[in-house]
Amino acid sequence: MVEPAVDNALWIRRFHPPPAPAVRLACFPHAGGSASFFFPVSAAMPESVEVLGVQYPGRQDRRADACIDSIDALADAIYPAMRAWTDRPLAFFGHSMGATVAFEVARRFEQRDGIVLAGLFASGRRAPSRHRDENVHTRGDQALIAELRSLSGTDTTLLGDDEMLRMILPALRGDYKAIETYRCATDSTIDSPITALVGDADPKTTVDEARDWARHTTGLFDAQVFPGGHFYLSQHRAAVIGAIADRLPRPTRPCAE
């Protein structure tokens, strides 16, 4: 039996809980993102898939919680909260930084519990072992805001609101520190199948860098390339949801009498 995690309610958001899901899809946000980014995904998924949104500290209803600026520490905190949801097959979807966090949580499930995911969907992020020398987290606030504008990942109305910016910048800086200081060995693998999803004009991840996720699974691998940049999924939500749903376990139908 899975023991409930103490901080489960802090970390997990349920938007449209179905009565009897065949699989649960836990979604991990990008740097500066929040669980609510995945509300439309939850609304559009088949009823057989329950979407869980992971809420990192330091944003929205967790503004008062200290940010975690290490991928390993973040994965260590999320892992026990996620264990309460393993009574169904579990799959992970992560966008940008979230893909790396999802990979590290998946590693913990395999190493500590012997639980293999039904699938890991890594979106808009190069393979864990592909490193770029980036230092956005060490720059000033205006550089962080410029980064947001260049990636088109934040509502432009928020970028002109000083009060809102003051609220999101600490979490954003912590997230950038976490992902920019993360390192992963080339031989670090999981047994779960991995699907890499990427925009063909993403400045943060080339198609080749995304395809290198293949070296981090002992299971099946495939890649899906979409038109667009880092937030290609905002323009191709239906196609992305379809690609994920097609690769998840199907509900078991009772045998006909």
Image (cartoon, grey):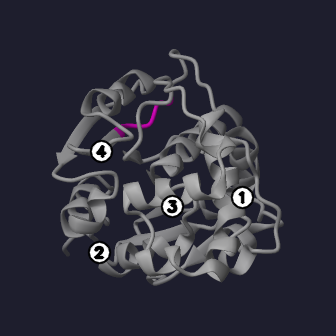
In front of the other: 106 or 235: 235
Mark 1 vs mark 2: which is more N-terminal? 1
Residue type at the position of mark 1: Val
Q: Are marks 3 and 2 in contact (CB under 8 Å)?
A: no
Magenta: main secondary structure equals: loop
Label 4 sits on residue = 202
Picture quarter with the N terminus: bottom right
> Of the residues tagged 1 and 2, which is closer to the observer?
2
Instruction: Give the residue pinned by disc 1.
Output: 2
Relative depth, front residue between 44 and 252: 44
Please report the bounds of the magenta region as a residue range.
190-194
Please tell me which of labels 3 and 2 falls first in the chain. Answer: 3
Specify the quadrant of the image occupied by residue 25: bottom left
User: Which x, y percent locates residue 146?
Assistant: 48, 56
| Quarter residue 67 falls in | bottom right
Q: Earlier in the sequence, mark 3 or mark 1?
A: 1
Q: Is residue 32 inside the magenta stretch? A: no
Who's the residue at 25% across and 33% down the image? 207
Task: Judge left or right: residue 217 versus residue 10.
Answer: left
Pick whichever of labels 4 and 3 is earlier in the sequence: 3
Of badges 4 and 3, nearer the viewer stands 4
**Disc 3 on helix, strand or loop?**
strand
| Residue 134 position in % (x across, y down) | 55, 33
Q: Which residue is mark 2?
A: 46
Secondary structure beneath disc 2?
Answer: loop
Amino acid at pointer 2: Pro
Tell me the amino acid under the disc marked 3.
Answer: Ala
